[in-house]
Amino acid sequence: MIALDIELVQGAFRLEAAFQLDARVAALFGPSGSGKTTTLDAIAGLRTPARGSIVISGHVLFSSDAHIHVPAHQRHVGYVPQDVALFPHMNVRRNLLYGSHPGMSPDLDRVVGMLEIDKLVDRRVTELSGGERQRVALGRALMSGPSVLLLDEPLAAVDVPLRRRILPYLQRVRDDLKIPIVYVSHDRGEVEKLADVVVTLEGGRVARVENV
Amino acid sequence: MDVWRIAWFTVLCAAGATAVMLPPGVLIAWLLARRQFPGRALIETFVSLPLVMPPVATGLILLVLLSRRGAIGRVLERFGIEIVFTWKAVVLAMAIMGLPLLVRTARAGFEQVNARYERVAATLGARPLRIFLTISLPLAWPSVLGGAVLAFARALGEFGATIVVAGSIPGETRTLAVAIYSFAETGQDVQVFRLVLVSIAIAFAALWTANWLVERRAA
Amino acid sequence: MRPALLALIAALTSGAFQNVPSPKPITVSAAVSLTDTLTAIASEYANGGRGTVRFNFAASNVLARQIVSGAPVDVFVSADEAQMDLVAQAGLISDGTRVNLLSNQLAIVVPNDRPRTFRSVRDLADPAFKRIAIGDPAAVPAGVYAKQYLEKEGLWTAVASRIVPTGSVRAALAAVEAGAADAAVVYRTDARVALRATVAWVVPVAAGPRIVYPAAVVRTSPNVTEARRFLDFLHGASAVRVFERAGFAVLPVRAGAGPPRVPSRGR
């Protein structure tokens, strides 16, 4: 359950978004510049709204009225940016374990098995292909034991055949780990394969919310 | 005069100065690269001041602050700590003259680190200190190391501030640069050339060591 | 960085840094041109069990600034009166301790391979001297003296276009030794130790500017007795021998102005 109602000004761009979602996978859909990534960053705690509130599963992450601003490192969100940003000075294993906490994180073997990256764990991240990088970044986010997964255009950087191969992994994460996902995309077809709810953003405002 | 003793003393002091300035220098560099805070421009200017001021002027300011009647020296004297005209003054003068080079180089290194890595690390639960130690510092390391070597090299050759605040006391505060000046002023050319050769050798050794360290990391 | 730090600490507790001997040595700030003579005199002083001296040798203007800024100095020996006056104006000279210790003379040197002996200073106007090095008259005391002297002799306008100002008097000498200048006006003491330059003309004491090295005890010295004892020793027979060997003239102590008398002045 995600309840969001924020105003965020960034230079000339103004985001005013409000929605409530109770979905396994919610997609933020819209053309580029519509405020999808900004919304995602606000949920992750990487941008601070001027006003409003963000509540996930009953936890208030941000509230301008109550002066609450939980810092990013205490939000327990699994965040995968568009360029995946694997730490280049660490190998795959150290990337995967960076955010893991004993007791809170899923089992490493289970995650690498599910994402089929078990043979990559001792590789350097510079040696990985685009699809491999996506899966390692996903694994890294999952290993932090997140209460929600935030994925920014996870399939934008990979070509169409690869997209078809990564999609099942995302579906597996959705079905096996039962972690809610907020998913940013500008591809309608992709959105319909994964999401239960689609929030369409246009020019910094919510245009509509639809069940798929 | 024992050339090797002067050289060894100079290298020790320069290494000590580098060690002393490294923690605050790296911290300042990171703050300037990543944080907005009141007084930022002031710190930025202040740190660069030794770069633009004549070294002798820097030495005089240190001297005025640290001498027995100075604002800091008066306090230190109560604890029995004397800085002026001791090796501690040599280390301090070297550290302050080297600091701008360290801060500027390291800062550029931190700025080149993609901020996304730091943001992702935060979402993975890392506190700012852990992000700094595991992400920012390792990724900026070649620049930090380069800055440290530059500062070390600057410290080796420091003259103007050193001679003012530490003096030129044979066997106590006389560094290579100060000794070269003294020998030149007393017409002892043979000693001058010996010291110059030793200085060149040390400078080469320092730069080669730095290159080797950077390349070994890159490999 | 830790091994380096440990090495530093290790060195501090061992021999790389001289341990301060007891009793506490006095600190003498002296003009860099006195390095050799004062070092020799201090070793005699120490051998006689009178006490230990640690020197701080630099340009006199730097030394004066240090003292005025509060540096811990017991005795100041300056290469010119102006710098001693600066310290005196700051009220930092111990009453009745200032003495004119030494005097120096100017000399004109030429390269070894083109030796000359002047009949008078006027020979400097010879067009063969295309470049004449002197300390920068705007900053270097030796340059100030050289300009004063040449003006007094009415030669300045004739040679002004050929003057090469240098950053120190040693640099002027070095220019001649390197063959970069055809002549230089330097101190007689410098000329004496030059290896590749020879003296063409020594400026007579009466004709030249008054070049005096004053010495005094610094008022803030915690070791006034020790400081005075060393100052006295500089006027003693053995010190005078060292100074004169180097080409300095040791000045007699003026009555009432100097430190307490020491028997047998040697002059």
Image (cartoon, rainbow, N blue to C red):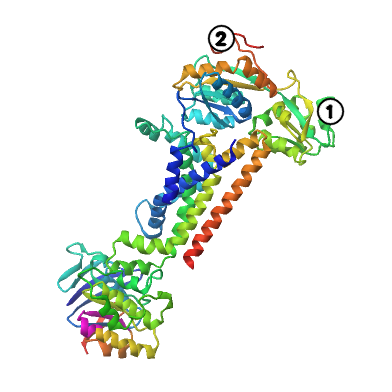
Residue at the image point whose x is 43% and y is 51% from the top: C1
Q: Quadrant of residue C130?
A: top right
The N terminus of chain A: image quadrant: bottom left
Residue at the image point whose x is 25% and y is 64% from the top: A71
In the image, B13: left or right of B200?
A: left
Give the SS element for disc 1: loop
The residue lying toward the viewer, choosing from B79 and C46, is: C46
Q: CA distance from mark 2 to mark 1?
A: 42 Å
User: Where residue C117 is drawn, which disc sits there?
Assistant: 1
Residue A20 shown in magenta: no
Residue C239 percent coordinates (x, y): 62, 19
Indicate which disc, 2 or 1, sits on the residue closer to the N terminus.
1
Residue B130 percent coordinates (x, y): 32, 61
User: Where residue C261 is drawn, which disc sits there?
Assistant: 2
**Chain that bears disc 1:** C
Residue C219 percent coordinates (x, y): 47, 20
Question: Relative to C65, is A43 above or below?
Answer: below
In the image, A148: left or right of A58?
A: right
For label 1, count other residues whose C-alpha is less than 10 Å away and answer few (under 14), some (14-19) or many (20+): some
The residue lying toward the viewer, choosing from B85 and A199, is: B85
Residue at the image point whose x is 57% and y is 24% from the top: C43
In the image, C237: left or right of B115?
A: right
- The residue under label 2 is which amino acid type? Arg
Question: Relative to C114, is B155 above or below?
Answer: below
Residue A182 shown in magenta: yes
Give the SS element for disc 2: loop
Q: Which stretch did the figure color magenta? A: A173-185
Residue A195 percent coordinates (x, y): 24, 86
**Chain that bears disc 2:** C
For discs 2 and 1, the disc positioned in front in the rendered view? 2
